[in-house]
Amino acid sequence: MNDFQPNQDICLVPYYPAYEIALPWYQDAELCHHVDNQNRIYDLSILKNMYQYLDSHGDLFYIEYKGILCGDVCLQTSGEISIVVCKEYQNRHIGRTVIGKILALAKEKKYPQCYAEIYSFNKQSRKMFESIGFVQKDAETFVYTLDKKEAPMTNLTLDEKKALIRMALEAREQAYAPYSDFMVGAALRAEDGRIFTGCNVENAAFTPTSCAERTALFKAVSEGVTHFTDIAVVGSRRGEVNKQITSPCGVCRQALFEFGGPELNVIMAKTPDDFIERSMDELLPFGFGPSNVAGNKAVEE
């Protein structure tokens, strides 16, 4: 990570309803255009909705400079960073220092990477993020890898991850869950790029129930595919909107470890824009796999 010089004049203040202070920032049409690419200024209702959404999807702060609130910044659970500095306080290197603090927070939370969505016309923000070390991945996405050793073992782009999540969401709609009413969908990506989807299938006897992850896995294996790189998992009660991630159960982790190993990248999502990633090694440390059954010869040089 880049070294950021400490600045005692700048600090992050946890979010609280300071709408009378923040609203004037969003009365600037150019600033609002950079935020959401719409030709409008924010009214109180828009501002409240935005802050409530960000506060419920990550860590939201006000930016304080020399004792004065002058902007806001959010680190979402997906790793996305968004920042606004009001026009009067721009060009003082506040943004660079604040992003450094947010990256430190993300690393503390063990996020493998962070990203920012920046429109092509917002050249000042692009230049700032690139100066910190963010790398452009597609037209509007800039990514910062916090620790390459901790990063998921995946070559998927952000758009490909979002597409995998959408496939899991579609699969969830087929769930047979008359007993729990909890619907789960999974989309499993093989090494050759093929994707297999699955949903949970419950049973009146309970024990024969199959989770979505194993449904997708068994479908793939039955077609001769046994090596996988990524899986997206989504879940929620019927008719509800996801408010928390759904992770694979212990049995599914063991089943996936068999064919994906410790490097399998597990994407656990609320929506295509709100997700976290973990390696199977993090979800199932010291996992028991084929090499254990093979005994000492599996580790002999």
Image (spheres, rainbow, N blue to C red):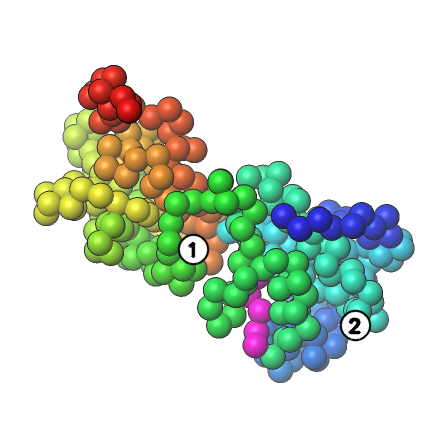
Residue 67, image x and y in percent?
Answer: 89, 53
- Judged from this view, the residue extending furthest toward the front is 301
> In this view of the protein, which residue sits in the foreground, 121 or 42?
121
Residue tagged 2: 87
Range of magenta residues: 116-120
- Which mark is in front, 2 or 1? 2
Residue 84, image x and y in percent?
Answer: 70, 64
Q: Residue at x 53, y 58 (%)?
A: 143
Q: Is residue 3 magenta?
A: no
Judged by its main secondary structure, the magenta piece is loop
Marks 2 and 1 sit apart, C-alpha to C-alpha, by 32 Å
- Quarter residue 128 falls in: bottom right
**Which three-letter amino acid code belongs to the residue tagged 2?**
Lys
- Residue 294 vertical position relative to residue 211 in the rendered view, above or below: above
Which image quadrant: the C terminus?
Answer: top left
- Judged from this view, the residue extending furthest toward the left is 223
In this view of the protein, can residue 132 be seen by the observer? yes
What is the secondary structure assignment of the residue under circle 1?
Answer: strand
Labelled disc at residue 271? 1
Q: Residue at x 29, y 57 (%)?
A: 167
Q: Residue at x 73, y 54 (%)?
A: 98
27 on left or right of 184: right
- Residue 81 vertical position relative to residue 38 in the rendered view, above or below: above
